[in-house]
Image: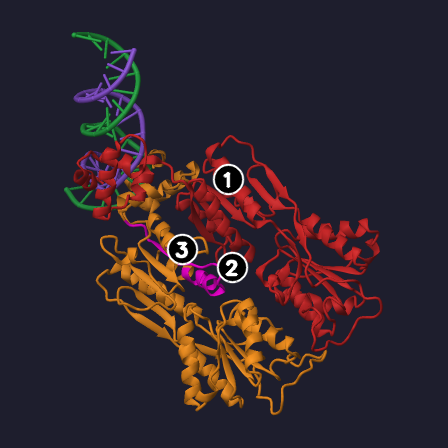
Chain colours: A orange, B red, C green, D purple
Amino acid sequence: MSDVARRAGVSPALASLALRHKPGPSPTSRKAVLQAADDLGYRVNTAASLLAKNRSHLIGVALDLSQSFHVEAVDHVYRVAEAAGYNVLLSAVTSSRPLDRATESLIEGSCEGILIVGMHSVPESLLGSPTRMPVAVLGHAEWTGSFDVVRTAGDLGVRSAVDHLVSLGHTRIAHVDGGDNSGAEERRRGYVEGMREHALGDLLHIQRGGNDEEDGLRAGRELLERAPATTAVICYNDSCAVGMIQAAEQAGLTVPEGMSIIGYDNSPVGRTSYLGLTTVAQDTRRLTEISVQRLIEGIENPARPHTETVLPPRLITRSTTGPARPGPAAITRGAADPRLP
Amino acid sequence: MSDVARRAGVSPALASLALRHKPGPSPTSRKAVLQAADDLGYRVNTAASLLAKNRSHLIGVALDLSQSFHVEAVDHVYRVAEAAGYNVLLSAVTSSRPLDRATESLIEGSCEGILIVGMHSVPESLLGSPTRMPVAVLGHAEWTGSFDVVRTAGDLGVRSAVDHLVSLGHTRIAHVDGGDNSGAEERRRGYVEGMREHALGDLLHIQRGGNDEEDGLRAGRELLERAPATTAVICYNDSCAVGMIQAAEQAGLTVPEGMSIIGYDNSPVGRTSYLGLTTVAQDTRRLTEISVQRLIEGIENPARPHTETVLPPRLITRSTTGPARPGPAAITRGAADPRLP
DNA sequence: AGGGAATGGGCAAGCGCGCGA
DNA sequence: ATCGCGCGCTTGCCCATTCCC
């Protein structure tokens, strides 16, 4: 930096101010410094700057890249964080890289706070003093009051799915659940409550599912065998629903005539015009905005109490749900797919 | 750190050595330091350490999280980098965040080299002195000799797809291409060469496609209208192929009886037991290993000449390809899906 | 018994920048 | 607009002790 300053004919201190667009330097010297920096291809040394400032303006994000919801969130995180003057550090959780390793590397990256996407637990090491660090969770974590949580009311989402199906005349509505995946318990509860509310408590059928197509396919096959009278299924998520659709088609059921199917997440896979999956959408954008906001508030005011924010989901009706079939299931599928124009 | 040193009864310098597991301290003082650090919940200040060492042992990775190939690569990157004593900095490229912004933030994160996944260009700012920085590209970049490239021979992949189809008796083989997406040109060339080699140059049909299902669906509809005699299609990638399959089924063609379809990438979407997509697989693992290796070599020996490494792809035959239909296309699809057991 | 290597440990000079005086 | 200190750590250099020829 002193090279830059010399070239611009000012002191290093002034150059520092100019380079950071801080008030102080006159327009003349400001321009001179910027020009000199450009000529010399100079870039500030982040480490030194960080050491001197003792602030990084960096927020860390731990996520599972294999989940489309997380990937979608990333884009919003960048937007919101950058608008608030923060940079973003990403760290992936994978099958071979547990959450605590991900957060560990974020801390090493000297971030000032951590956003955890979609995990249901928070590493204790983050919350215990003296290493305490602001944490926000975007997703379903048990809220203990020592971090912020921003999530969707999954139970409401599934209840609205039940409502929708009931309004179409369905009664034998099953649920392919998500086992112990993130948010699965809540959705299961929403299903049970929704069914009971419509006095369909006797027809409850929960089939163990999972979070991918394979799981949905397997669960679907089992479901159709055990409860062949089922006319509608609410699945843990969209991938799972796609598997369920495949199971139904394999069994000779058209969708939605023979079987109505609802997913959860409004993921890209369900959005294609071909599939047109009816699904429960989370407001990824708002969720992300709020969680990043909360995290930044927690960074800038460590005394601030932590909150849990629950947003309502929204049912998106597309073409995998339709009126309950009056008679027995259709068992043929013709060339003209009725889902399509 | 001096607190730790005091508590352990040694000097800060010795504590530094002990904390970094460097030779010097006796086993006794080493243990004392580690114990003291643990008691105090001490963590080294990365910024200060970095400033003093002037090395970060960090490699930056710029990628597009919406592409499954990139996501798959991440896992391997972590493995290889960590094995070589490097940490990883991730930076996403999205529709609103161009590559140069991603690499910019990696540089700010003080990484020592950058791995660019699947983009076909390298920001000039990375290569021009005096900011020059080691760069490796995992994917199809025009190799200029000023960075390393590790990629798959896409043309060979598509040629082997053509070979496979020809061996099944197909001649009217079309290609739904990837437009100007990464690697599309090479795959298109492989198609043309493969067809010519089998003296099928007259039957060339290239349909403008893209990289997602929507593109594949649209391209498929057009293709079936313009070249209804087509019996096999090689698609730019798996998502595109899924769209193509949907277009075929909508037109009343069963797969593979009425139409054989091949994808590219061996992505999760095609791997499900239901789809069983025949596809050209890249060796993601090897590609990643080599590219990270090359990058690290470039960091540790800046004088090293840059290389281009081209790996062969591998055709994975599953159930969306079959013998060419002898007569006209089948136009019905029954309940019993012949793809399935 | 004396000299030299080997070993464990301390001292202090920065690293490049930001900020208060 | 400048001066100069200090952020927390690393590292080269030097000192002290021990052990061995």
Q: For the residues marked 3 and 1, what is the alpha-carbon distance in whole angstroms?
A: 25 Å
Q: Are marks 3 and 1 on the same chain?
A: no
Residue at mark 1: B295
Real-space Cα separation, disc 2 to disc 1, in angstroms: 26 Å
Q: Chain of mark 3?
A: A
> Does residue A9 appear in this view?
no
**Magenta region, residue range:** A55-77
Q: CA distance from mark 2 to mark 3?
A: 29 Å
The secondary element bearing badge 1 is classed as: helix
Q: Could you tell me which secondary element the residue under label 3 belongs to?
A: loop
Q: Are marks 2 and 3 in contact (CB under 8 Å)?
A: no
Q: Which residue is mark 2?
A: B95
Query: Where is residue B207 drawn, in percent x and y?
Result: 72, 61
Q: Nearer the viewer, residue B67 or A189?
A: A189
In this rendering, position of residue B178 left or right of residue A193: right
Residue drawn at (47%, 74%), measured in percent from left and top? A177
Foreground of the two, A202 or A34: A202
**Mark linked to residue A98:** 3
**Mark 2 belongs to which amino acid?**
Ser
- Callout 3–callout 1 Cβ contact below 8 Å: no
